[in-house]
Image (tube, rainbow, N blue to C red):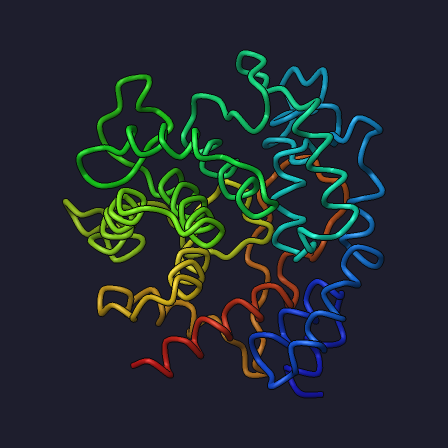
Amino acid sequence: MSVTDWLLDGDPAIRWQVLLDLTNASPDEVAAERARVEHEGWGARLLALEDPDGLWAGGACFPASYTGGEPGQPWTATMHTLQTLQLLGLDPASGSARRAIALVAENGRWEHAGQRYFDGEVEPCINGRTIETGAHFGVDVAAIVDRILEERLKDGGWNCEAENGSVRSSFDTTINVLDGLFEFERATGGSAEVRTARRGGEEYLLERGLFRRKSTGEVVDPAYREFAFPYYWHYDVLRALDYFRQTGADPDPRMTEAVADVRSKQHSDGRWLLDRIHPGRVHFGLESVGTPSRWNTLRALRVLEWWDETT
């Protein structure tokens, strides 16, 4: 079985993206396969777990009554579930998406201070993801975008710890904001200010080769070279490269080492493994660590195709 056939033997959430990115399928074929995400497989399973008020696990960022003490961070609440549904490809125009987003807008409140869900809260990491989800599903999130633009640090990126005095950006926060700003641009056309901020955040990552300290050249975190899915708020170089691919950016020589990292992880059968799962409670698992990963294989193949075609 070819790698493409193996990918197409997976969940509808995988199949429609393979048809779109790795084959010559027609737009009608892609749309028909994508429509299945709402009714079959992982997408349907997540939608079936939605509470009557439109939330998941009774909370925005954390499950209701969460008091800590669990391994990792629980990923069952609304924010993480909506992000996963977006990554799976739930059509924003579908009945399930429209219903869920309307209910989240009405009933969702952030644990921080009870802010309405699509008004965002104080952490740019959270707000970046809220911008991405809101823009993708048709919510007006311009007010959060304005806030994010004002919070960019002098080195070009963002950091959730800025409110506690940090003056240096972080990879994790910056990629979440970049994903949000790009989705906002894609949905609304954006503005010169948004594009300038996004370019500054991209330059922050590129100056560091996507995973190294600018000051010493050391690897910031070995986990940045391990590929997880879903990634939630976490950064890794495959996520960063897939971001640049989606934006239509030209490959930059400063990405070369990160691309080589991705290429080096391909096994002789043409597949990539799931390197890690970020610890924490989930609704259900998608793939297992150390086994061939359709998600990582799909994402790596389309990154390498983008890189090889344009270099």
Q: Quadrant of the N terminus?
A: bottom right
Residue at 60% in and 31% down: 73
Q: Which residue is nearer to you in this view: 269 or 184?
A: 184
Give coordinates of residue 43: x percent, y percent: 76, 53
Give coordinates of residue 288: x percent, y percent: 69, 57
Give coordinates of residue 76: x percent, y percent: 70, 34
* Above or below for 219 versus 127: below
Residue at 75% in and 28% down: 57
* Above or below for 252 versus 310: above
Q: Quadrant of the C terminus?
A: bottom left
Q: Is residue 2 left or right of residue 262?
A: right
Q: Is residue 268 left or right of residue 99?
A: left
* Above or below for 260 versus 57: below
Residue at 62% in and 50% down: 86
- Marker count (numbered): 0
Residue at 79% in and 26% down: 53
Report if residue 55 is visible in the image.
yes
Q: Quadrant of residue 258?
A: bottom left
Q: Is residue 253 left or right of residue 82?
A: left
Q: Quadrant of residue 145?
A: top left
